[in-house]
Amino acid sequence: MKPQLIEAGRHNRDLAASTTRVIQGGSWKKQRTVMLIPAGESIPTKVYLSHCGLIFPPNQAAHRMAAMGMEVGEAFSNAIEQILAHPDLQQWEYLLTIYPHNIPPADGLVRLIARMEAHPELSCIGGLYWTKGEGGVPQIWGDPKDPVLNFRPQPPDPNGGLVECCGTGMGFNLWRLKMFRDDRLRKPWFKTIAGAEGVGTQDLYFWGDARKHGYRCAIDCGVLVGHYDVATDTVW
């Protein structure tokens, strides 16, 4: 081994840059996160392993919660009601919704949190995943530049940037929990409809109302999320 000079460490070498990195990431602040998954009695092994590998912010509180045996809209609405009724969880900063067939990257959550810290104007940011099957579309719903509310699928940013939209899926989404304390929002928040009132999924049912009250969302095209099809063993 060659003779070496002992130094104060690589991070201390450029303290200004290291400090800026910490401040921008927001890890010095509370970033407590509830992870909520609506599920049946089991989830596929490949999906489970990806969830096990999910990194949470260091030294921050985290709570994993499953809503079992309910329709997905009811699962989300009922579970969030329970979170807001809890004396501790109701004060937390973030809610991560994740599906039992979505495969996020290990650093997906911390990257979404960093995006949220950098974009206080957004109340929800999701990872990029596509509908299943050939010809699938990205779940980036609606062009906010159109004065008429719409949920047309928008193209992702190939450079991994943020794409603001009118609505998102819920397969890997980070929400500011405080938005659900807004009494102006319609309840139940999430509802799957199929009848005289129309047809729609629970996620876009929510955003159709939330947009009226100024809430904004986006998709982080740098957080790539797989969408697993058990029947064909294919990740779309």
Image: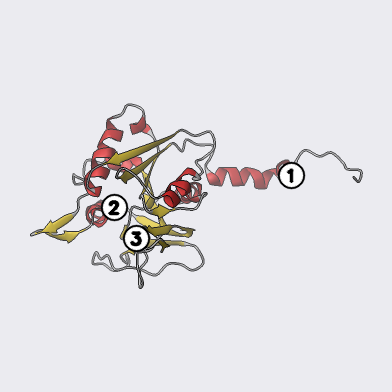
Mark-to-mark CA distance, 1 and 3: 49 Å
* Image: 153 above or below 47: below
**Residue that mark 1 sits on:** 10
Callout 1: SS? helix
Residue that lies at the very extreme toward the top in this rendered image: 87
Secondary structure type for disc 3: loop
* Residue 131 as seen in the image, left or right of residue 56: left
* Residue 121 position in % (x across, y down): 39, 51
Please report contact status of discs 2 and 1: CB closer than 8 Å, yes or no: no
Quadrant where the C terminus is found in the figure: bottom left
Q: Which residue is mark 2?
A: 214
Distance from label 3 to label 2 (Cα)?
A: 40 Å
Image-based side of 180 in relation to 26, left or right: left
Q: Residue at x 49, y 68 (%)?
A: 158
Q: Earlier in the sequence, mark 3 or mark 2?
A: 2
Mark 3 neighbour density, 10 Å: few (under 14) some (14–19) many (20 or more): few
Mark sitting earlier along the chain (1/3): 1
Q: Quadrant of residue 41?
A: top left
Q: Residue at x 81, y 39 (%)?
A: 7
Q: Is residue 10 above or below residue 198?
A: above
Q: Position of residue 34 (x, y in %)?
A: 39, 38
What residue type is disc 3 on? Ala
**Amino acid type of disc 2?**
Gly
Residue at 19%, 53% in the rendered image: 192
> Pointer 3: what residue?
231
69 up-or-down from 173: above or below: above
Using the image, tell me which numbered label, if any, was put on residue 110: none
Q: Quadrant of the N terminus?
A: top right
Q: Depth check: give the residue in front, 28 or 131.
A: 131
Q: Residue furthest right?
A: 3
Picture coordinates of residue 43, whole percent (x, y): 37, 47
Q: Nearer the viewer, residue 90 or 54?
A: 54
